Amino acid sequence: MAAEILDGQAIMRARRKAIKTRVAARVSAGHRAPGLAVLLVGDDPASRVYVRLKRQDCQVVGFKSDVRHLPASTTQAELVEIVETLNADSSIDGILVQLPLPAHIDALTVTETVSPSKDVDGVHPFNMGRLVLREPAIRSCTSLAVMKLLEHTDVPIRGLHAAVVGASNHVGRPTGLELLLAGCTVTTVHRFSRNTAEHVARADIVVSATGIAGIITADWIKDGAIVIDVGIIAQADGRLAGDVRFDEVAEKASWITPVPGGVGPMTRAMMLQNALDSAETADPL
């Protein structure tokens, strides 16, 4: 079996086009364009690339963008003050604090400072709690990207067994909750799990988010499984790799995401969608 490719770039472009149309309709009706603020602290090379792409996305869809590159010496108090100012800015609908932050800044404190209504990353405790209660508000943009990619397969996933590899607050945990909400039976495996490969090999859907290049091999995958690779790891030669050994796993899976070009672009699209939704809640047509 040769897997079909879930082309996140193509799906993202279609979603971005729909968002652009909606933004144009808002502006034509006399409403403001949505505003997105992105805060980058320090000079992490990968983060600089992500922020550049997010700025480009805002330009494509017609958002107002407020991208701030702050020095690594920025204090936690200074960053919190900037976030609080953006919370009070009625022209800003979404605030994204790019991770990782320098070691002297507590990421959870900053995350909790962002207004839940402007949390386009979807990881504020309020928004995570709503997802736990099966009453989602703003949803984790990466986990939502995974769900949109699964929708694109047209495979009914209710009742299927899904294995989530990794239990991070940003990806693994909210993805498991999203899959539960969709009616899947969910197994989460993590660094303390025993017989990890055996758990994954029973799954109809595998979502891997470990950041360990090539950890998912063909013998971990059930014939015909859908495989979503959230990992993206820079190699010594400059290439990007995922958690999944793509070539060998693609021989067993029914659908698979590439790295790059799979979950990453869709995460950016869902961030835009979250910001648009926030704008329409604050200033409905």
Image (cartoon, rainbow, N blue to C red):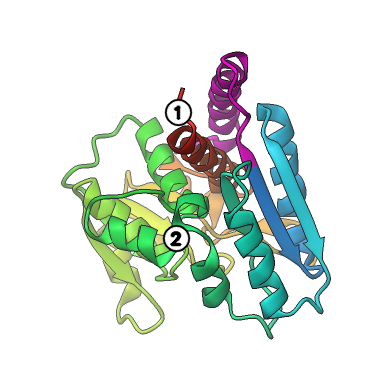
Q: Position of residue 152 (x, y in %)?
A: 40, 31
| Direction from residue 228 to residue 246 in the image, left or right | right
For label 1, the crowd category at 10 Å Cα-Cα, with few meaning under 14, some 14 to 19 and many 20 or more, is: few
Residue occupied by mark 1: 284
Label drawn at residue 21: none
Closer-to-camera residue (270/228): 270
For label 2, the crowd category at 10 Å Cα-Cα, with few meaning under 14, some 14 to 19 and many 20 or more, is: many
Residue 149 falls inside the magenta stretch: no
Kind of residue indicated by mark 2: Ser
Residue at 32% x, 80% y is 193
Q: State how far apart marks 2 and 1 are (Cα).
A: 37 Å
Label drawn at residue 208: 2
**Quarter of the image where one finds residue 80:** bottom right
Mark positioned earlier in the residue sequence (2 or 1): 2
Q: Secondary structure at mark 1?
A: loop
Closer-to-camera residue (256/115): 115
